[in-house]
Image (cartoon, rainbow, N blue to C red):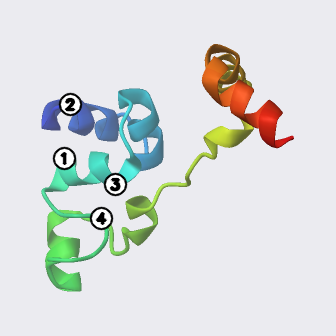
Amino acid sequence: MPTTEQVHRLLEQGLDYPEIGRRLGVPAGQAYLIATGLPADGSDAPSPEERRRRGLRLRSQDLANPPHENPASSAKVHDWIAERVRADTQMRAAAEVDG
């Protein structure tokens, strides 16, 4: 888990939250939470005036839901599935009977 100091150091270098998240191996919203103590989804958020005073982003929702990755399109996943099929003789035999 990255520390507040790590996130702040990267912010001081001028990096944005998506890049900080990539470098630290966490979602951008989590990097924002670590740095600010506030959830990126906007819940439990201070007023716009308080945000400006504390130097927080006015909008952070874009950090809360990082893009997902579909592992079904990964060659590594296809290889794993193929190996599982080869290893399951009972299921292969059942498929031959039904086929």
- Amino acid carrying mark 3 in the image: Gly
Q: Report the front residue among 39 and 5.
A: 39
User: At which x and y percent is residue 25?
Assistant: 38, 31
Q: Residues within 10 Å of mark 4 (few under 14, many from 20)?
A: many
Determine whether label 1 and label 2 are within 8 Å by CB. Answer: yes
Q: Report the front residue among 78 and 12.
A: 78
Question: Disc 2 or 3, which lies upstream in sequence?
Answer: 2
Query: Mark 1: which secondary structure?
Result: helix
Identify residue for label 4.
Answer: 40
Identify residue for label 2.
Answer: 1
Determine whether label 3 and label 4 are within 8 Å by CB. Answer: yes
- Amino acid carrying mark 1 in the image: Ile
- CA gap between label 4 and label 2 equals 17 Å
Q: Report the front residue among 92 and 48.
A: 92
User: At which x and y percent is residue 33?
Assistant: 21, 54
Question: Disc 1 or 4, which lies upstream in sequence?
Answer: 1
Question: Disc 4 or 2, which lies upstream in sequence?
Answer: 2
Query: Mark 3: which secondary structure?
Result: helix
Q: Residues within 10 Å of mark 2 (few under 14, many from 20)?
A: few
